[in-house]
Amino acid sequence: MKGLWYPLMKLHEQHQPQLNLIRRYGNGAIVVEDREIFAPCVVAPGILHTHWIDTPAALTLDSLSLLWPLEPRILLLGSDMRPPGLREIRLQLAARDISLESMDLGAACRTYNVLATEDRPVAALLFPGKVQP
């Protein structure tokens, strides 16, 4: 069912490729700038990493190590599933002065765009998932 996107409007009108703004999401995919992504990914200004963990359940401090050079202060987890051990991961991140916020995919995409355009040190951990028929 290609072509069905939620919401049915563009998320962002600005074109700043270095920010990796999320243009659309839904139907098991997200569009970052002009790239359609169907797998879990990490999006941050200056980085788009698509070969990452398969499910939120695999989220660990080690799986986030690719972000350390960016020095993020805010991580947005966009998924309909809350990973086990989320409280422990939050505590470990807090020791590094990093906040982890868990929300649904749409909220994470919208929040990422706002924070990235404000030049905030943010990264989004996104799990697009599949739309059930």
Image: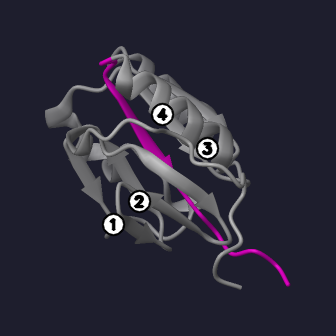
* Residue 27 place in picture, x, y as percent: 68, 71
Crowd class of label 2 (few under 14; some 14 to 19; many from 20; radius 10 Å): many
- Amino acid type shown at disc 2: Cys
Image-based side of 69 in relation to 54, left or right: left
Q: Residue 110 bears which disc, if any?
A: none
Q: Residue 41 bears which disc, if any?
A: 2
Name the element at disc 2. strand
Reading the image, the residue beneath label 4 is: 112
Reading the image, the residue beneath label 1 is: 50
Q: Which residues are magenta?
A: 119-133
* Residue 70 place in picture, x, y as percent: 19, 32
Q: Residue most toward the left? A: 69
Q: CA distance from mark 1 to mark 4?
A: 17 Å
Q: At 39% from the left edge and 20% from the top edge, which residue is drawn? A: 98
Q: Main secondary structure of the magenta part?
A: loop
Q: Earlier in the sequence, mark 2 or mark 4?
A: 2
Crowd class of label 1 (few under 14; some 14 to 19; many from 20; radius 10 Å): some
For the residues bearing labels 2 and 1, Cβ distance under 8 angstroms: yes
Q: Residue 85 bears which disc, if any?
A: 3
For the residues bearing labels 2 and 3, Cβ distance under 8 angstroms: no
Crowd class of label 3 (few under 14; some 14 to 19; many from 20; radius 10 Å): few
